[in-house]
Structures are given as C-alpha cells and as structure tokens.
Image (cartoon, helix red, strand yellow):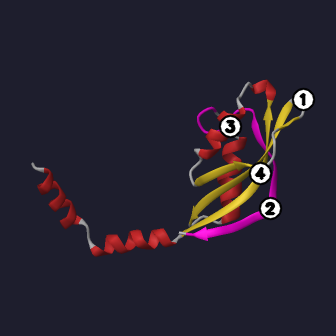
Amino acid sequence: MSMKHILENFKNSVTEELVSEFKEEDKAYSHYRINLIIKISKKSNVDVTDVFNKIRAIKGVTTLRQEQAISDRGTHYLCDLNIKFLTKGVGTVDYVREVLVKFINSELEVQGIPGAKVHLINWNSFNKVGSR
C-alpha cells in the first residue's frame, strides 16, 4: 500500500464533525500561572534540578520559572516557583490542588517527587495569562 493511498484513506475518514470537535477543544484551554513555594528535604538526596524537571513533566504544565534564589534552610531547601499551566475543562483551583499539589506531594517515585512538598500556595499570584 503506497503512502498516497494511506493518506487518501485517512483524508476520507476525517469528517467535518470530527474537525469541529477538535476546534472546540482548542477553545477550551486557558493558560494560568501561580507561585508555589516548594520544600525539598536534603535527606532525600534529590537534586533541585531533578525536582524542577519533574514538575515540568506534570500534565498541563507549560513553563516553570524560579522567582528567587533557592533558600538553604539547613535541613531543606525552599524554592519559589512561578508555574504556568493549561486547563481543559478542569476547574483552576481543582487543577492546582488535585494535579500540581497532589503530584508534588506524592512520595511515589513514578507519580511524584520524593522529598518534595508544597510548602505554600500563593493564591494572590494566581491569574489568567491567556486563552488558546
């Protein structure tokens, strides 16, 4: 079967209804940002860069920026992070609590960040950045 034949079959199978459904989904995305203070235990031997990368990998997170220098508090580090994220049909407060915070606070190696906890959610920093 040639590539041209495969593309023709694909093109014929895509309906207008499916195309409009994708366009509607695009409209449902909104871009937000919030500052979180993350506490990283030194006992866990987790590199701060690894923690940042795992947060970037959370579904919906688009960018992460460090707001201030990392504060060394003896037994732990405190990191002030500005996190931008997209939501789709999920309430923004629910996304922050049920996705961001839940993932960061999880001690599971696969579904979380061992040694990291959300120390503070700065709700005053929460705002809508734009829509997509």
Where disc 3 sits, the SS reads helix
In three-dimensional space, the C-alpha distance between marks 2 and 1, rounded to whole angstroms, equals 27 Å
Which mark sits nearer the N-terminus, 4 or 3? Answer: 4
N-term mark: 4 or 2: 4
Residue type at mark 2?
A: Trp
* Residue 25 spot, x, y in % from top left: 46, 69
78 above or below 86? above
Spot occupied by residue 117 in the image (x, y as percentages of width and height): 77, 41
Q: Residue at x 67, y 54 (%)?
A: 98
Query: Which type of secondary structure does the marked residue at label 4 adopt?
Result: strand
User: Circles 4 and 2: CB distance less than 8 Å?
Assistant: no
Q: Is residue 67 above or below residue 114?
A: below
Q: CA distance from mark 4 to mark 2?
A: 9 Å
Q: Residue at x 81, y 39 (%)?
A: 70
**What's the magenta region?**
109-131
Of 18 and 29, nearer the camera is 29
Q: Give the residue furthest to the right.
A: 74
Residue designated by label 4: 36
At label 1, counting other C-alpha atoms closer than 10 Å, the crowd grade (few under 14, some 14-19, many 20 or more) is few
Please state which amino acid type lies under the numbered disc 4.
Leu
Q: Taking 121 as reference, is 55 above or below it?
A: above
Which of the two residues, 59 or 128, is positioned nearer the viewer here?
128
Look at mark 2 in the image and give the residue it sits on.
123
Q: Amino acid type of disc 1?
A: Gly
The disc at residue 51 is: 3
Are the residues at dot 4 and dot 3 in contact (C-beta closer than 8 Å)?
A: no
Name the dominant secondary structure of the magenta segment.
strand
Query: With 65 as the anchor, is 20 left or right in this view?
Result: left
| Residue at 16% from the left image edge and 54% from the top image edge | 6
Q: Report x, y in % for residue 80.
A: 79, 47
The amino acid at mark 3 is Val
First in sequence: mark 2 vs mark 3: 3
